Amino acid sequence: MKKLILWTSLATLLIAIMAHFITLIIIPYQIMNTTMAKFPVNVLLKGTRTTAESRTVVMPCPDLVYSIVTYDVSKYPLRFTAQVPDNYWSISLYDTNTDNYFVMNDKQVKSNPVELLLVGDNWTSSDAGIAQVVKARSNKGIMLLRYLLVSDARLDDLYKVQKQSSLKAEGKSAEEEKPAKVALSFDAAEYVNAENGFSIKYPKEWKPGTATGRQVFMAAASARVPTMSVSVVTGDPSMRDALNYGLNALGFTEISIGTESQVSLSDGTLATKSKLSFKLPQGYAAEALALGAHKDGKLFLVVITTVSLAAPYDEAKFSEIARSLEFSAERPAKVAPAEYVNSENGFSIKYPGDWKVGSPSGKQVFVAAAADKVPTISVSVLKEDPPLKTALNENLPNLGYTDVSIGPESQVSLLDGTPASQCKVSFQLPQGYWADALALGTHKDGKLFLVMVTTVSMASPYDETRFSEIAKTLKFTK
């Protein structure tokens, strides 16, 4: 009896030990397979700022912005190129067992931009160019990039650096990369926008409507829902920020934006989609599918909306419509800049040709804005000739702006050689939105000429290089 108990105990212990080791071996693979299944293969997904809802990366750090790739190098090597910022940055590679087998940070890079060639078991060539060759421990795995956000004010600069990273399958032919044309499940009409270089298909029985604001096209079913809108947002904001800003501006409430997923358009362009829900001003609860694609420094945003009481939310059909968005091979020509001339004060200034002139107020003599209301440009003439910071501190509160923060001044020259000062300004608008602006001031004939190019980053990110370029076209004609 004692021997039976002893053997039973030993057998139980052995089974427990074996189960433990099997768990240690299998679970990591299950974790990686589950994670990798969430993302398209060999596509560099560039994330936005981490929020409480962010779950693309497990237990994300709020001070980091992430990019991620689910890689497969079984057929082709992958060439990765990235611009390294002047603060913390790292790249980590994980195999299918969750082991981190390669790490490089900003202190270890030997060149900037950095270039890596990730190769699999079948790679035999020695031609890597200037890239550092990294042998993948498993043909499939995950690449994770981390960018440190030093301060909120530098978020847009960080996004610019992040956008300069790229991933390319080496040796893959153009024919292999070309996506197969998918037949639509509905009879389609087509809208073509030559100015922005895209087209999109929609159900033939839907009728085009009147586009407003940043929208360039709108169509709706005979029952008024579903509706489809296509917007072109300059400044290339994230889809989530553009939606929050746009839906709030339309008076929608109780806005909820679901988890984003990555999809491909009919022409192979990578896009992001998510489900939305919100309450219309009339009180009805609405649901929508939103799809966003980044191209040529713009966000192309498709939103298909319905009120379920009238027409049920149909994710499969709505997604099929939105993904018919296609970009033409020939890119549209850039719009020539427009020019404002002020004979009374003897100056001129150039601004984007697709911006619309508005109504100046106070000491402003000129105002213009993009189709989606931001960015805006204003030119003011202050005869008291105050210093730039004094003028900003006195005039911005008079416009109802609060929490004004003025950054350090730097000395610049206008295109005609006139010396000027510029600085970044942040403040809260009366509507509650946070705004950033590039302020440029120059003194002439006992006056301060003040140019401000302002944006709400939720709708169109702050772009100091572009805004300064616009402001510095200020030119004196006498």
Image: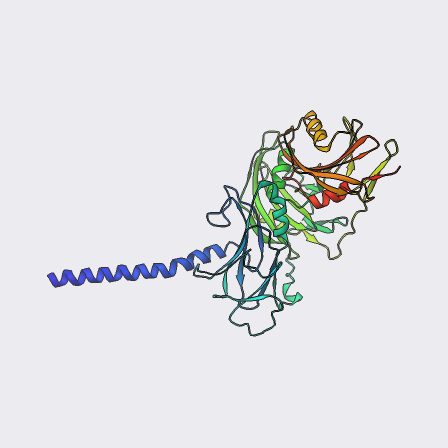
In this image, 30 relative to 440: left or right?
left
Residue shown at 69%/53% (left/top)? 326
Q: Is residue 413 visible?
A: yes
The quarter of the rendered structure image containing the N terminus is bottom left
- Quarter of the figure with residue 8: bottom left
Q: Nearer the viewer, residue 242 or 185?
A: 242
Q: How many marks?
A: 0
Kindly indicate the quadrant of the structure image that contains residue 427.
top right
- In this rendering, the answer to whether 56 lies above or below 108 is above
Give the percent coordinates (x, y) of residue 70.
Answer: 53, 58
Q: Looking at the image, which is closer to me, 355 or 156?
A: 156
Q: Residue 11: percent from the left, percent from the top?
A: 21, 62
If the image is split into quadrants, where does the C terminus sit? top right
**Residue 396 screen position, x and y as percent:** 69, 29
Q: Residue 344 is drawn in which quadrant?
A: top right
Is residue 211 visible in this depiction of the protein? Answer: no
Where in the figure is residue 132, as x and y percent of width and height?
Answer: 57, 66
99 vs 417: above or below: below
**Relative depth, front residue between 397 and 383:** 383
Residue, x 56% and y 38% (percent of image)? 277
Residue located 85% across and 32% down the image? 345
